[in-house]
Amino acid sequence: MHAIISNNQEHYQFQYINKIDSVSHLVTGNNPAIKRGLIDGLNYGLHVPDNADAVLKNRQELLLHFNLPGAAVVIPEQTHSCNIAIVTPENANHIFNDTDALITNQKNIIIGVLSADCVPILLVDPVKHVIAAIHAGWRGTVAEIGAKTLFKMNQIFGSQAQDVIACIGPSISQKNYEVGNDVARQFRAGSQKKVDEHKTCIDLWKENQDQLMDAGVLKKNIEIAGLCTFTETDKFYSARRESINTGRMGSFIALN
């Protein structure tokens, strides 16, 4: 993953997706120097205490970043569920409540998820021309939302896991994600690093990578950003660092 400057803002892109001509994507940075709403920077979340007009302006600017002036921007109402929706031209204006992953095979639709420590995952099937955006918090990760999204891509569109490119975006790193035993016991041993009798650090990047590989994605087709939202204070929002009322970054993807 590398930083880019788009419309005088600093954002990020995955190297693997940039190799696919039929897809455009953007992972937003917080850009704290920009003052628009009640939260410094570019917040894309309407569920936090910010000025709604500022948030909607940020979302509308995505059309410029993608150079898709007439596109629909679809962001679900995330609830740490394992619910997955298929986006079509007919339902692109629908509010996808209680949904944490979106899939589409249609052009002129930008799909995305929001995060501020949780794991955003973008999937691309360059053979069947299908894309997905996934929000995997610890609950979604435990529920294997990434693998379930792959299964639905196969079920609905015939995508084969070995063709899929999977990109795991900026999120909290293992050394900064300390949880109690009640949460830790739900993860694989290989994703855990014991701190003491009561605390464990969880590697959400590895956990999601291993689940995707178990579902058939090739390791060589998985890119992990390796950027920690908790420590990169000048690049990303972090709910653990700043409270749940902080802003939200977006991970967006569209078919060209």
Image (cartoon, rainbow, N blue to C red):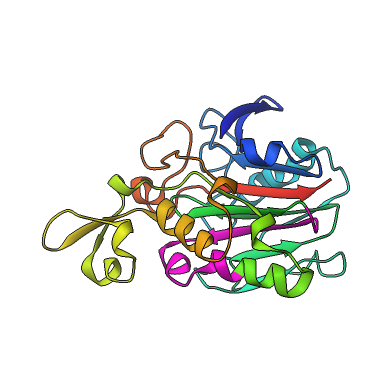
Q: What residue do we see at 51% from left, 55% from top?
A: 48
Q: Horizontal and vertical percent for residue 19? A: 72, 37
Q: What residue do we see at 48% from left, 33% from top?
A: 235
Whether residue 96 can be seen here: no
Q: Residue furthest left?
A: 197
The quadrant of the rendering that contains the N terminus is top right
Where is residue 25, by image quadrant? top right
Give the total number of marks visible in the rendering.
0
The quadrant of the rendering that contains the C terminus is top right
Q: Which residues are magenta?
A: 127-148
Whether residue 93 can be seen here: yes
Q: Horizontal and vertical percent for residue 182? A: 25, 72
Where is residue 244, by image quadrant? bottom left
Where is residue 90, by image quadrant? bottom right
Q: What residue do we see at 58% from left, 29% from top?
A: 3
Query: Residue 173 versus residue 75: which sits nearer the camera?
Result: 173
- Left or right: 38, with 230 as reference point: right
Q: Horizontal and vertical percent for residue 139? A: 43, 69
Query: Residue 52 versus residue 112: which sits nearer the camera?
Result: 112
Within the magenta stretch, is there residue 69?
A: no
Within the magenta stretch, is there residue 128?
A: yes
Query: Residue 142 versus residue 74: which sits nearer the camera?
Result: 142
- Left or right: 167, with 63 as reference point: left
Q: Horizontal and vertical percent for residue 152? A: 67, 72
User: In the picture shown, does residue 56 fall above or below 12?
Assistant: below
Query: Residue 112 versus residue 188: which sits nearer the camera?
Result: 188
- Left or right: 54, with 20 as reference point: left
User: In the picture shown, does residue 210 fall above or below 252?
Assistant: below
- Left or right: 226, with 72 as reference point: left
User: In the picture shown, does residue 35 fall above or below 86?
Assistant: above
Q: What residue do we see at 88% from left, 48% from top?
A: 70
